Image (cartoon, rainbow, N blue to C red):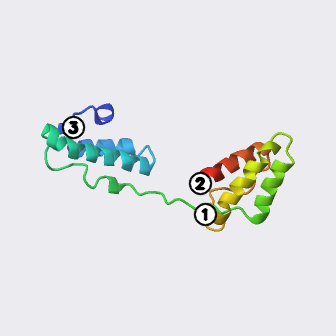
């Protein structure tokens, strides 16, 4: 990764190289930048024993420069919205065969509806209903 973006070897990393790499990382999401820097730090720790890299890891503490963006919780479906979703399956000529599956998903997730659900209010189109229920299944 360093060679790709900075065209240097690991042993040649100095503060200037780190600053240059941080400029590249500013173009990506903070969490992605943190992960890449953590990988570089771990690779340095591993390479210290294998390839005689200096003991001082220049990537130590660098990831903390990136602030993570807090994830906003999405409100759960109300009882009326769940009813509308199930009615959408029941009345759809294309998706009525998924009604039993939708009921099973609803029963499996029913205990989590008050606490956590990663869906937005009920969609209008039947295709969006299927996708919403898929999201229910993987939450």
Tell me what residue is drawn at x 37 percent, y 48 percent: 35
> Is 117 or 33 nearer to us in this picture?
117
* Contact flag, marks 3 and 1 (Cβ < 8 Å): no
93 horizontally vs 68: left or right: right
Element assignment for label 3: helix
Q: Position of residue 131 (x, y in %)?
A: 69, 45
The reply to whether dot 2 and dot 1 touch (C-beta < 8 Å) is yes
Quarter of the image with the C terminus in it: bottom right
Callout 2: few (<14), some (14-19), or many (20+) C-alpha neighbours within 10 Å? Answer: few
Helix, strand or loop status at disc 2: loop
Q: CA distance from mark 2 to mark 1?
A: 9 Å
Q: Quadrant of the N terminus?
A: top left
Residue with the mark numbered 1 = 116
Q: Of marks 2 and 1, which one's residue comes earlier in the chain?
A: 1
Q: Is residue 38 left or right of residue 46?
A: right
Gap between marks 3 and 1, in whole Å? 44 Å
CA neighbours of label 3 inside 10 A, class few (<14), some (14 to 19), many (20+): some
- Residue matched to label 3: 10
Q: Quadrant of residue 116?
A: bottom right
N-terminal of the pair, mark 2 or mark 3, is 3
The tag on residue 128 is none
Residue 93 point in image, percent of width and height:
86, 41
Residue where numbered disc 2 is placed: 139
Query: Residue 103 location, x and y as percent?
Result: 75, 54
In the rendered image, the residue lying farthest to the bottom is 114
Q: Residue at x 82, y 44 (%)?
A: 96
Secondary structure beneath disc 1? loop
């Amino acid at each position: 990764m360093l060679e790709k973006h900075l065209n240097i070897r690991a042993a040649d990393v100095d503060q200037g190289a780190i600053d240059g790499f941080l400029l590249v990382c500013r173009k990506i999401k903070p969490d992605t930048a943190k992960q890449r820097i953590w990988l570089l730090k771990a690779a340095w720790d591993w390479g210290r024993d294998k390839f005689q890299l200096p003991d001082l890891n220049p990537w130590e503490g660098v990831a903390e420069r990136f602030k993570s963006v807090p994830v906003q919780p999405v409100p759960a479906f109300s009882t009326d919205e769940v009813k509308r979703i199930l009615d959408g399956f029941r009345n759809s000529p294309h998706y009525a065969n998924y009604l039993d599956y939708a009921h099973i998903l609803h029963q499996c997730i029913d205990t989590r509806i008050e606490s956590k659900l990663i869906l937005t209010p009920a969609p209008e189109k039947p295709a969006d209903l299927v996708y919403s229920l898929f999201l229910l299944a993987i939450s």
